[in-house]
Image (cartoon, rainbow, N blue to C red):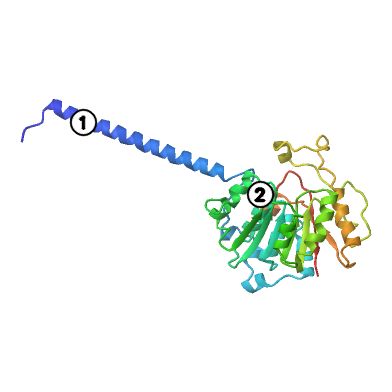
């Protein structure tokens, strides 16, 4: 074998160093590419609310510790009202599914899908089929990113394994939408579309028919500036509209009351709900109840909710009516 000269050995060493450097550069470049792609992926599927896939240990104790039999039994009026009185925030309505036995819900006026997100994540422990219908004429990009079945946020979180989600791009009074579902089909109907007196007045009789006995009809933005209510059950208790939250500044929400910092008066919604109770419900025993939205980060987190997921641009309460 021909001996290797000192010069040849130097060339071999230089060549190996060169190969090592090239390999190191390729590894660093690949790592940077992977990190970049992950960042882009995360940004595509996260909006203004912080999202974290909830594990079994993060679920609310009341849902996690309930037996299958308890979760399947539908709560009665006393149980629903008592639970919501003890937990007077809208996000706890999500437990009406997991704990209260509700299995068919519809949210009308979905916007970004943040409340839908709360309902789905709070009931992720359910290992039986249930369904949510979402209705909005103008779905946002954030809602679309959540709903995508192949790589959407809800699909990745496993929310679609047992929950069937149907989306209708239309308005709340569309005859085709109403004809899609028989009377008494839903356990839970939540109205959060147009918040005017006329809109809520037209919606309530249409969607009350779709609520099953033992279910509830509910809606958002039930507050005013201290005006007196009508003479009906629960109508004397009307929460006051509170100040806008800091997130309203972030999103530059427009309001006639932005200068004072107070959320807009929702007396139109209040009157529509109370007038329906008196004039159209046909049942003088019906009672309107409402949430308070006085939650804190600590009060939410002890039950498995995240403050950033629940907080909105305002703290406007919701109303609900139980259907006997």
Classify mark 1: helix, strand or loop: helix
Disc on the earlier residue, 2 or 1: 1
Relative to residue 254, is residue 206 depicted above or below?
below
- Frontmost of labels 2 and 1 is 2
Q: Locate residue 291: give its quadrant.
A: bottom right
Residue 41 is marked as none
Classify mark 2: helix, strand or loop: helix
Q: Residue at x 71, y 64 (%)?
A: 181
User: Mark 1 highlights which residue?
Assistant: 13
User: Mark 2 highlights which residue?
Assistant: 309
Quadrant location of the N terminus? top left
Does residue 323 appear in the picture of this structure?
yes
Relative to residue 167, is residue 73 depicted above or below?
below
Residue sticking out furthest to the front: 176
Foreground residue, 210 or 310? Answer: 210
Count of numbered badges drawn on the protein: 2
Looking at the image, residue 24 sits to the left or right of residue 176; the answer is left
Q: Residue at x 80, y 56 (%)?
A: 203
Residue sticking out furthest to the top: 7
Whole-percent x, y for residue 241 in the image: 83, 46
Cα gap from disc 2 to disc 1, whole angstroms:
58 Å
Whole-percent x, y for residue 17 in the image: 26, 31
Whole-percent x, y for residue 230 in the image: 93, 56
């Amino acid at each position: 074998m021909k001996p290797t000269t000192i010069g040849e050995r130097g060339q071999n060493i230089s060549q190996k160093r060169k190969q090592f450097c090239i390999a190191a550069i390729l590894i660093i470049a690949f790592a940077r590419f992977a990190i970049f792609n992950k960042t882009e992926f995360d940004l595509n599927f996260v909006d203004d609310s912080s999202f974290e896939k909830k594990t079994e240990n993060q679920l609310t104790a009341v849902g996690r510790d309930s037996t299958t039999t308890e979760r399947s039994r539908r709560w009665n009026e006393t149980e629903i009202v008592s639970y919501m009185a003890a937990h007077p925030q809208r996000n706890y309505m999500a437990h009406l599914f997991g704990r209260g036995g509700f299995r068919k819900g519809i949210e009308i006026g979905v916007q970004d899908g943040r409340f839908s997100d709360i309902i789905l994540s709070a009931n992720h422990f359910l290992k039986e089929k249930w369904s949510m219908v979402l209705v909005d004429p103008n779905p946002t990009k954030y809602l679309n990113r959540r709903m995508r079945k192949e790589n959407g946020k809800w699909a990745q979180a496993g929310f679609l394994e047992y929950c069937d989600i149907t989306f209708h791009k239309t308005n709340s009074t569309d005859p085709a939408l109403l004809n899609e579902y028989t009377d008494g089909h839903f356990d839970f109907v939540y109205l959060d579309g147009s918040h005017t007196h006329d809109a809520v007045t037209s919606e309530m009789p249409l969607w009350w028919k779709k609520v099953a006995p033992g279910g509830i009809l509910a809606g958002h933005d039930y507050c005013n500036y201290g005006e007196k209510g009508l003479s009906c059950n629960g109508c004397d208790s009307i929460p006051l509209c509170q100040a806008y939250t800091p997130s309203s500044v972030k999103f530059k929400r427009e309001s006639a009351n932005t200068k004072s910092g107070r959320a807009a008066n929702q007396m139109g919604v209040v009157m529509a709900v109370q007038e329906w109770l008196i004039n159209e419900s046909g049942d003088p025993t019906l009672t309107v109840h409402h949430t308070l939205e006085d939650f804190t980060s600590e009060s939410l987190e002890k039950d498995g909710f995240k403050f950033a997921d629940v907080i909105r641009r305002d703290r406007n309460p919701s109303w609900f009516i139980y259907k006997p």
